[in-house]
């Protein structure tokens, strides 16, 4: 089975899965998370066109605010 990882957690890979679709599946607000694939920042406007491939390492960063 092919896999990829999100923040070092292994996930099963599916053909045609984009970064935008993954965020939607996880219920994450697109404007509340920064994304990188294999260490390269993916701007919000490119997430729909950025397909996840087997072996990719996604980093999702959700800023925490407060004081």
Image: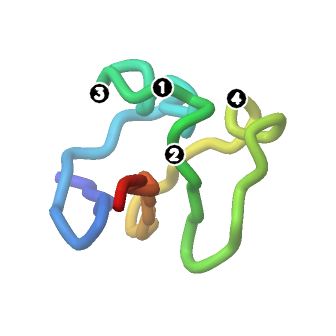
Mark seen at residue 61: none
Q: Is residue 21 above or below residue 67?
A: above
- x and y, in percent, of residue 36 in the image: 58, 64
At horizontal 76% and vertical 34% (from top left) the residue drawn is 49
Residue nearest the observer in this picture, 47 or 52: 47
Q: CA distance from mark 3 to mark 1?
A: 9 Å
At horizontal 57% and vertical 55% (from top left) the residue drawn is 35
Does residue 16 appear left or right of residue 40 in this picture? left
Q: Is residue 62 above or below residue 20?
A: below
Mark seen at residue 48: 4
Does residue 11 appear left or right of residue 5 in this picture? left
At horizontal 17% and vertical 52% (from top left) the residue drawn is 1
Judge the density around disc 1: few (<14), some (14-19), many (≥20) Cα neighbours within 10 Å. few
Query: Dots 1 and 4: beta carbons under 8 Å?
Result: no
- Identify the residue under disc 2: 33
- Identify the residue under disc 3: 26
Query: Dots 1 and 2: beta carbons under 8 Å?
Result: yes
- Closest to the camera, between mark 1 and mark 4, is 1
- x and y, in percent, of residue 18 in the image: 56, 34
State how many labels appear. 4
The residue sitting at the bottom extreme is 39
- x and y, in percent, of residue 8 in the image: 23, 72
The residue sitting at the right extreme is 45
Q: CA distance from mark 1 to mark 2?
A: 7 Å
Residue nearest the observer in this picture, 14 or 25: 25
Q: CA distance from mark 2 to mark 4?
A: 14 Å
At horizontal 69% and vertical 43% (from top left) the residue drawn is 50
Q: Earlier in the sequence, mark 2 or mark 3?
A: 3
Q: Quadrant of residue 3?
A: bottom left
Q: Earlier in the sequence, mark 1 or mark 4?
A: 1
- Identify the residue under disc 1: 29
Q: CA distance from mark 1 to mark 4?
A: 14 Å
């Amino acid at each position: 089975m092919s896999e990829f990882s999100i923040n070092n957690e292994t996930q099963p890979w599916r053909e045609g899965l984009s970064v935008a679709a993954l965020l939607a599946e996880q219920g994450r607000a697109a404007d509340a998370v920064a994304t990188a694939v294999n260490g390269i920042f993916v701007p919000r406007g490119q997430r729909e066109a950025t397909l996840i491939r087997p072996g990719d390492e996604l980093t999702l960063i959700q800023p925490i605010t407060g004081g």
